[in-house]
Image: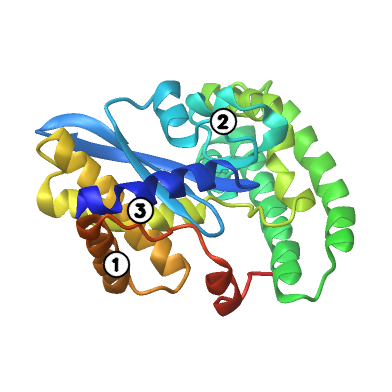
Amino acid sequence: MSQAVAPSVVEAEAFAQRQKAANVDETGWYVKHHRAWLWVAVTMWVTVFKIHARRNTAAALALLGQFRGILSSDRWKVYLAWVVEKRQLCWAHLIRDFRRFAEMDGRAAEIGEEFLDEAKLLFDFWYRVRDGTLSRSGFRCEMVQIRRRLRHLLMEGAQCRDKPVRATCRELLKLFPALWTFAYVKGVEPTNNAAERAIRPAVIWRKVCFGTQSQEGCRFAERIMTVVATLKQQRRNVADFVIQACEAALHGYKAPSLPPTDAVLRAVRIPA
């Protein structure tokens, strides 16, 4: 089965690398009881998994190749390989940091609370964009003031006596443009939830089966996870696809396509 779906997965990887936006995440994995990493890239139509021995830039490039779209992720340092203007930082991760500040003492706690207030206001406006009660142009106007206030808070936090607050704020000032990409690029979300949701079934697999035991097992795992996640995105039948792939491999036919065909695009409503 792994060999049968391999050409389809290679096609899906190339397709994902050409997309305008991708959500990326990584989680721990085990290969024969040695630590490894499972990476995922989620695009509108295709989700791709890759198991790699490292959690470094080489591993990210093995997954993303020459990807030139908007990269949504957390602040893990390997993503610094992409220019800040082509990134979107996950606001869910930022809110966790702000909550941690709010649990401190003194001015750090006050800064944390002010950060949380601005984040709540931002998402209140974003939800209105999502439900159609606020235009994108109106949303961008509202973001002007939030952006100004947040920069001021970060500059104040960068001088804070509490080291964790100071370090985080200085980092965010360097990455500041990547906080707002979602407001200007359609199809980009303010959080990395798409990648985190996609990787959860793999985490359950790892906990139940303790990872994989060979490189062949790694290739099977990443390929079958790619196939299942992508077909669910496109509302296609997994069993039918696998049967078609196996029959194609047995008879020397061209493997079925994981990237969406015109028929799939017509059958599935394109997200707003």
- In the image, 204: left or right of 228? left
User: Mark 2 vs mark 3: which is more N-terminal?
Assistant: 2
Q: Position of residue 127 (x, y in %)?
A: 69, 68
Quarter location, residue 252: bottom left
What is the C-alpha distance between the residues marked 2 and 3?
19 Å
- For the question of whether residue 218 can be seen, the reply is yes
User: Mark 3 vs mark 1: which is more N-terminal?
Assistant: 3
User: Which residue position is annotated with label 3?
Assistant: 226
Task: Say which residue appears at 63% left-offset and 71% top-offset.
Answer: 270
User: Which residue position is annotated with label 1?
Assistant: 244
**Callout 3, which amino acid?**
Thr
- In the image, 200: left or right of 165? left
Q: Secondary structure at mark 1?
A: helix
User: Which residue position is annotated with label 2?
Assistant: 66
Whether the residues at callouts 2 and 3 have beta carbons within 8 Å, the answer is no
Whether the residues at callouts 1 and 2 have beta carbons within 8 Å, the answer is no
Task: Say which residue appears at 64% left-offset and 34% top-offset.
Answer: 107
Label 2: how many Cα within 10 Å (few below 14, some 14–19, many 20+): few
What is the C-alpha distance between the residues marked 1 and 2?
30 Å
**Callout 1, which amino acid?**
Gln
Label 1: how many Cα within 10 Å (few below 14, some 14–19, many 20+): some
